[in-house]
Image (tube, helix red, strand yellow):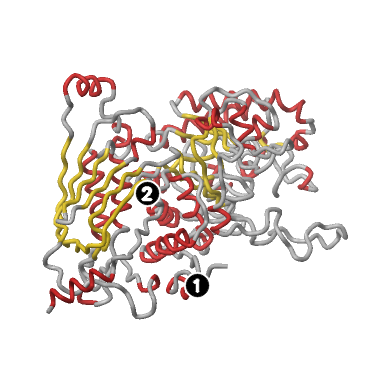
Amino acid sequence: MLLANYIASLLCVLNTVLAIWPQPVEFEHGSKVLWLSPGFKVHYKFEEPAGILGTLQSRLMPWWYEHTTSIVDQSSKDILDAAVGRMRNDLISTSADSPSKVFVPWKFHPKDAIPEPGTVKYENIIYSITFLFRRPYTLQPQIEESYSLDISSEGHVLISIYHPLGGLQALTTFRQLFYKHSDPSEATSPYTPYIPLSIKDVPVFEHRGLNLDISRNIVTPAEVMRTIEALAMNKFNRLHLHASDAQSWPLEIPALPELAIKGSYHKDQTWSVGDLHEVQTFGALRGIQVYLEIDMPGHTASIHAAYPDLIKSYNRQPWPNYSAQPCAGQLILNNSAVTNFVSTLLDDLLPRTEPFSALFHLGGDEVDANAYDMSPSELAPYLQDFVDHAVSKVHSHFLTPIVWEEHILDYNLTLPNDTVVQAWRARTPNGRSAVAEVVKRGYKALFGTNEYWYLDCGFGGWRDPDLTNPDSPVKSPYLDYCSPLSNWRHIYSYDPLADIPESQQHLVLGGEVHMWAEQTDGMNLDSNLWPRAAAAGEILWRGKGVVSEDVTRRLAEMREWLVAKGVRAGPVQVTWCLMNPGNCRQ
């Protein structure tokens, strides 16, 4: 009788749809149920070179994950073992005090009609996972994160990868295959209804990031690490920390001790050397390169508290004439003291961040020529000298510089060929996107426009009205400059390559979704980010998407995974619509 019930339950899941986020490039699956053994084992195999070609590959393309493993001082096996351990803790409940982080999928089926398997689970069990390391056949960066995942009807799991990063992505996918049974007695062992299964996956873009502002409002290292967990679940691989701005300088620089002491909001609201190291290590173990931005020479008024002689036009009024935001103030150009300051700053910071990422962001947005009492054309040669010096410092530490688009689009500066230019404006005066203008000039680019991927937009203006000014622009309905709010569907509809010729698309490395923090801190960070950032994550992994009910339902499942992991992600849709598919179309 139990077996009959079990077979009947399998028939109920024939129409189950694979709800992986981001969606894999290629996949096929059946509808048989397998259970995951709490004590599943992990095995590692290495592909042997095949003849002369294999020997040549081993010489020309040796194991090129040495840099990745060195950042945490562990072997590839250790990295994957740690990831498997985290996954085991998420999927398997070891006690009442240590519940699993798997959910019962009741929201995705009609009421009281979850197509669950029966309670017989002693057959059809996954007992082991095998990783097969293959030899790389290309030097394309994306191959590092590619993987194939195959699960046979007998429960044999094979993950084929070229690099440990691919193993991390495969485990992220594997985790999403499982659900918790609604019967509490079954909760210690999750099941998957998608067997047999075959997935082949590789990202479209090599750089898939979140730009997170940790300076304008307080975001703690613990909150950033929770964000890293969510990023990894959505197959992001970069976290760009916007670590300083006009309002505060939270980052401790031992060579410049007064900088954070005086430049931060409060002595207890700083990021220590240990904090930064912990966050970058935490990211590295999860396949996330955490890299820093020190925005300069604009957005630097916070330096004035410690080094007033380095800042021009500090708190000059009316501030809108001299800066994009209060407080006005920018690093003085053509000044030896500023040059020495930048050298000291970068010589301290870069050696500490280099082991974790090959990138360093030098900022460069919204440099206001009025603060220097110059025209843009008069300022440009001084700005060129400043940028040349900063870039040379980045190069001296064998890192790749990133700058904002204004350096080339507004000031027409000349940058080294390896410079990555981050574009944020949706439109330039000629009607093309900024990213299209960047690649037209031959530079590598990152996309993520304010029109689609600024998560801070739409919450209303944060400036106060000047009651003595009858012409104050701050008035009802108190909108911000980039309203309305970009909901997840709008974010998902962004086509980053829409106006870029095919011949230039190879210069687009990827992009970032942006969380500026004028009205965000640790209390609302999760809900402001998720699930909207996840929508950007799938575009970064797969390329252009089309909004549909299938996308809604898959994103809603990812939201449940985030919530189960402790991330306070907002809902994707009304629960009734998820429980009644097809009934909320219009």
Residue in front for this viewpoint, 134 or 368: 134
| 164 relative to 378 in the view: left or right | left
The type of residue carrying mark 2 is: Pro
Which corner quadrant holds the N terminus? bottom left
**228 vs 373, nearest the viewer:** 228
Question: At which x and y percent is residue 346?
Answer: 50, 32
Q: Distance of mark 2 from mark 1, alpha carbons?
A: 27 Å
Query: Regarding mark 1 in the picture, which secondary structure is present there?
Result: loop
x then y, percent, for residue 20: 37, 56
Residue at image mark 2: 24
Callout 1: 10 Å neighbours few (<14), some, many (20+)?
few
Q: Nearer the viewer, mark 2 or mark 1?
A: 1
Left or right, 465 with reference to 418: right
Q: Quadrant of residue 85?
A: bottom left
Tell me the quadrant of the picture where the C terminus can be found. bottom right
Residue 257 visible in the snapshot: yes
Q: Nearer the viewer, residue 478 or 367?
A: 478
| Place of residue 347 in the rendered image (x, y in percent of width and height, measured from the top left) | 48, 30
Q: Which residue is mark 1?
A: 583
Mark with earlier residue (2, 1): 2
> Hey, which residue is sitting farthest right in the picture?
470
The answer to which of 487 and 248 lies nearer the viewer is 487
Looking at the image, residue 215 sits to the left or right of residue 284; the answer is right
User: At label 1, which amino acid type do we have?
Assistant: Asn
51 in relation to 581, above or below: above
Say what secondary structure mark 2 lies in.
loop
Residue at the location (28% across, 20% down)?
Answer: 60
Marks 2 and 1: CB-CB under 8 Å? Answer: no
